[in-house]
Amino acid sequence: MNLSSLATPSAAHGVPLSRRHWLAAAGLTALGSLLTACGGGGGDHNGPGAAQGRVQALADGLVKQGVVGAAAGWADARHTRVAVAGLRRLGGSAPLASGDLMAIGSNTKAMTACVAASVVDQGLLRWDSPLAQVLPGLAREALPAYQPITLRDLLDHRAGVMAFTALEDLNTFVNSVGIDVIARLQEPAEVEAFFLAWLLRQPPIRGAGADPGFAYSNAGYALAARMLRAATGQGWAELLRQRVAQPLGVSLFIGEPLRLGSLQPSGHDLANGQLVPEPLTEAPERVWLETLDPAGAVSLTVQDDALWLQWHLRALRGESTPLPRSYVQGLHDLGRAPAGRYGLGWLVHAEHGTGWLLHNGQDAGFQAMSVVALDGSRAGLAHSNIATADSMDLLYAGVSTLLA
């Protein structure tokens, strides 16, 4: 995305927000309804061949319905099944491979929350550590409403900071600070400090609906990552690799798949009504957008995503896992939370311990959907390398049938 184009009113109608775009919780709730309608089951009860066939059928079906490239995965506490179908790039001939990276967008948030839990377990922060205590310099310049917000408030989207999930917020920021600032500031630490200071001078926002304290925010995760760095002396990406990827045996890449190499899949988005490959964002905009990486910048293979979900199943079943103790406790707490509660990168669709943890993500022309049964029985996921409203609906429906 060219941030300079956002300074003109017409850009808001002609340029899709292709980075850190999270679809509304209403969609997740709709998926929860589909899953409930499917009932129980979902195990490997028909044998490994049948389970693999269902996963492959989902990937193939997504491609038949217009997805360029699709990946699907299923897990229980002992097995994973994954499949891919379609192409890496529209107009090309290279098929999507199981070892290809797919961007998972806001499904990254649970991984960031997992990092935070490891820091809490180490005693370097508490869930209720306030901004004013951890980042006193930033807090002194912030509006009073932000000074008491805590690490957990930020991770659960209850801090009231601007969302940065829509073009309007980018417009507000660019028009406020000016294009010259975007071009002049290019050092990551300097960019982060400027952006967070600006963010905390903006009026708090309130959520809509029955829970006005909940206001989804990508920028809140950037602020949480800054708190983690203050406590550990390490940046978010380094913490993610050391405290999540390595202990769990999961390979992660930070950034769009194409940044790893030209043979990786392209994301696709709509431009003037046509589906086209999305180009990589470069300077001067790139460093500013990367400030929001803790909210949604992970790419990984479908097998690694299935393994990440499988660790959750084992933890929910009470098994010992490398997941941080306080993160696991948070998962169990969500099992007792009312439907619609958001916590640690997951949305609950559950009643009294039965149901699902859900999340979806969108980034750089990719979409992802993850669903985990709170009883630890099974999990499902789907990835696509296109990003349209219709394609996310396809992922919803596909994962729900996979878990039936």
Image (cartoon, grey):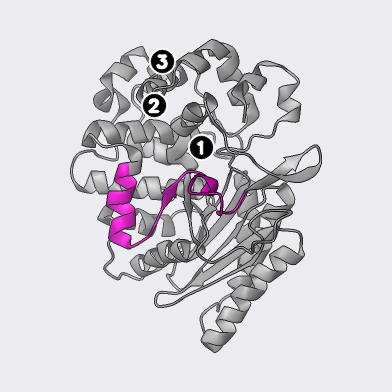
Question: What's the amino acid at mark 2?
Answer: Pro
Q: Is residue 81 left or right of residue 318?
A: right
Image point 70% across, 56% down: which residue? 92
114 vs 60, left or right, is left
Looking at the picture, which amino acid does disc 3 mark? Answer: Leu
Sequence order check: which comes first, mark 3 or mark 1?
Answer: 3
Residue plotted at (31% across, 26% down): 131
Q: What element carries label 2?
A: helix
**For residue 249: magenta?**
yes
Quadrant of the rendered structure where residue 129 is? top left
Residue indicated by mark 2? 188
Count the marks: 3
- Which x, y percent locates residue 205? 53, 25
Q: Which of 112 and 285 is in front in this view?
A: 285
State the residue position of label 3: 143
Task: Work out whether residue 19 or residue 31 is closer to the camera in this orientation and state it.
Answer: 19
Q: Where residue 214 is drawn, which disc sits there?
A: 1
x, y (%) of residue 204?
49, 22
Identity of the amino acid at label 1? Answer: Phe
Relative depth, front residue between 352 and 118: 118
Q: Which stretch appears magenta?
A: 238-266
